[in-house]
Image: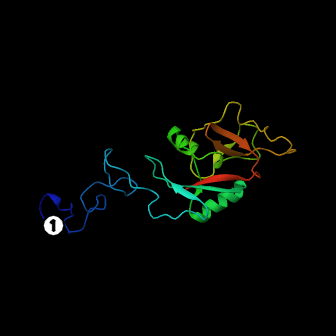
Amino acid sequence: LDGPFAPDGLPDGSLDAGRNDLGMDRGPDGRSDLGSDGPLPDPCEGILPPEGCTVWSCDGSRSCYARCPAGRTWADAQVACETWGGCLVSVSDAADQACLAEVGAVWIGYRQDPAAGEPADGWSWVCGSGGFTAWLPGEPNNASCEGCGNVDEDCATSSPSGWGDGPCSTTLAYVCAR
């Protein structure tokens, strides 16, 4: 190709690895830099949901989410997400939380180290990292499991109003991300 639409080439005729075949710069993730005015591609395009689950994406997100209504324990939910090629969802900011709030009460990928001090020490993401939290007032409290006996609440749940801690053995819907 010649003229203004020719790809930027190297002297040997190959394409610059930092640019795509249209001559646009690639970002650090290898995707083309479409600028802030261009739409992001649908991260769920071509992805089949796990059986019985529904996939969706949120504006501005590069993740594809799957809401799975079948009740599973936290550990079983994490295994199901891994089987799908993902992980229980990590929430990195208020926009993620707003997106997640639309799906009801679900397990998320935030868990407390059982050896940590109760109720608020040792929480971390099973996949991902970050300091964002959306705990409801008084949470985590390790105390809302009436009649459960001596069961620690070491796994986080998300609901439309915020997060709570719950026993990891409880069965609940969950959200995977990939």
Q: For the point 45% across and 52% down, which residue is it? A: 62
Question: In the rendered view, would you say 144 is above or below 79?
Answer: above
Question: In the rendered view, would you say 87 is above or below 99?
Answer: below
Percent position of residue 52, x then y? 61, 62
Question: Can you say which quadrant of the picture contains the N terminus?
Answer: bottom left
Whether residue 94 sits left or right of residue 172 in the image: it is: left
Percent position of residue 4, x then y? 14, 57
The residue where tag 1 is placed is 1
Q: For the point 66% across and 61% down, which residue is it? A: 79
Tell me which amino acid carries mark 1: Leu
Considering the numbered disc 1 on the image, is that residue within a helix, a strand or a loop? Answer: loop
Q: Residue furthest left?
A: 3
Residue 91 sits in which quadrant? top right
Percent position of residue 104, x then y? 62, 45
Q: For the point 78% across and 38% down, which residue is it? A: 144
Name the foreground residue: 84 vs 160: 160
Q: Residues within 10 Å of mark 1 (few under 14, many from 20)?
A: few
